[in-house]
């Protein structure tokens, strides 16, 4: 698609969003910056943006093939994803298949406890309030979404989980948990936006149990980029 990239409209912790000469499309540029702990721990890892963009693109394609609407149009160059422009809903929709991370600090679950059915948790995406967990009543009172929209987000998220879990399991990856964001497209459809990458998911190697995601960075371990690279080669392998 012939597209002209325009001005920067938003710069987040790991991605930049640019307007284009098509008012309903943006370019999401995946940067090499990596952060953890509410943005307190920061670094830059060469090629991280590139790997996150190809992993996210592949997973968006897998979801589209199952009829799930995503922002993805195409990768226009390294790390730059042409996407449908969305009016983002400030909810972090988290799906948990296995107990890990912050859930274990908040609730008395056992480490690695398996959740069947999965747990869906929603956090309010608001840095000033440190992304607190909320429920439907709070979301509705904050005018973030209606009850019907929340039900629809939940239903789409369960379908996303089922699709990704099966796809990744076939590639040798256990999808432990992941965080996604939705927005409204120009026709007011609820569409999956943002990214689905090792920055926003927990991936464990099914055979070796190795961690293949941002937890390595959170814990100050080495080999972060090797893990991201491994995820890319595992999922892109035909
Ligand atoms: N298709 C889209 N159209 C418009 N905005 C989008 C789209 N996809 C994602 N966004 C927004 O672009 C921004 C991407 O920024 P980024 O993920 O780097 O940082 P952040 O979300 O501000 O911080 P963090 O995710 O680290 O908490 C987010 O605000 C996200 O909601
Ligand atoms: Mg983000």
Image: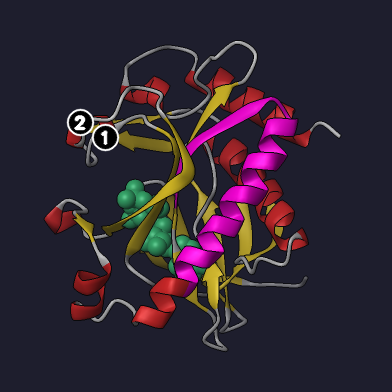
Residue drawn at 63 percent across, 28 percent down:
173
Residue drawn at 53 percent across, 54 percent down:
29
Place of residue 22 in the rendered image (x, y in percent of width and height, measured from the top left): 62, 82
| Quadrant assignment, res 226 | top right
Magenta residues span: 152-179
Residue drawn at 55 percent across, 86 percent down:
186
Residue 158: in magenta span: yes
Note whether 190 is above or below 134 in the view shown.
below
Place of residue 202 in the rendered image (x, y in percent of width and height, measured from the top left): 47, 33
Q: Residues within 10 Å of mark 2 (few under 14, many from 20)?
A: few
Observer-nearest residue: 119 or 221? 119
User: Residue 7: in sight, yes or no?
Assistant: no
Residue to which mark 1 is pinned: 102
Q: How is the image coloured?
A: secondary structure
| Quadrant assignment, res 215 | top left
Place of residue 25 in the rendered image (x, y in percent of width and height, measured from the top left): 59, 75
Note whether 157 is above or below 237 in the view shown.
below
Note whether 92 is above or below 30 in the view shown.
below
Image quadrant occupied by the C terminus: top right
Observer-nearest residue: 8 or 226? 226
Q: Residues within 10 Å of mark 1 (few under 14, many from 20)?
A: few
Q: Is residue 175 left or right of residue 177?
A: right
Image quadrant occupied by the N terminus: bottom right
Task: Kindly give the residue lying farthest to the left in the view shown.
Answer: 129
Q: Is residue 124 left or right of residue 72?
A: left
Report the disc number at residue 105: 2
As helix, strand or loop, the secondary structure at mark 1 comes to helix
Task: Kindly give the residue lying farthest to the bottom in the view shown.
Answer: 187
Q: Are marks 2 and 1 in contact (CB under 8 Å)?
A: yes
Task: Kindly give the residue lying farthest to the front in the view shown.
Answer: 116
Place of residue 77 in the rendered image (x, y in percent of width and height, measured from the top left): 69, 51
């Amino acid at each position: 698609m012939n597209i002209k990239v325009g001005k920067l409209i938003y710069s987040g912790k790991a991605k930049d969003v640019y307007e284009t000469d098509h008012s309903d499309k943006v370019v999401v540029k995946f940067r090499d910056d990596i952060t953890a702990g509410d943005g307190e721990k920061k670094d830059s890892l060469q090629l991280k943006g590139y790997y996150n963009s190809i992993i996210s693109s592949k997973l968006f394609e897998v979801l589209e093939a199952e009829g799930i609407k995503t922002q993805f149009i195409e990768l226009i160059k390294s790390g730059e994803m042409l996407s449908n422009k969305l009016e983002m809903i400030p909810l972090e929709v988290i799906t948990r298949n296995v107990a890990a991370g912050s859930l274990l600090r908040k609730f008395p679950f056992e480490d690695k406890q398996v959740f069947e059915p999965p747990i869906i948790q929603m956090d309010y995406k608001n840095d000033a309030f440190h992304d607190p967990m909320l429920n439907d009543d709070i979301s509705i009172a904050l005018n973030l979404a209606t009850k019907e929209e929340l039900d629809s987000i939940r239903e789409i998220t369960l379908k996303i989980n089922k699709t990704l879990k099966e796809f990744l399991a076939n590639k040798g990856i256990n999808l432990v948990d992941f965080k996604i964001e939705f927005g409204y497209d120009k026709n007011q459809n609820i569409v999956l936006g943002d990214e689905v990458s090792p920055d926003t998911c927990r991936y464990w190697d099914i055979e070796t149990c190795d961690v293949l995601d941002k937890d390595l960075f959170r814990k100050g371990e080495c080999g972060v980029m090797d893990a991201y690279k491994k995820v890319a080669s595992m999922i892109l392998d035909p």
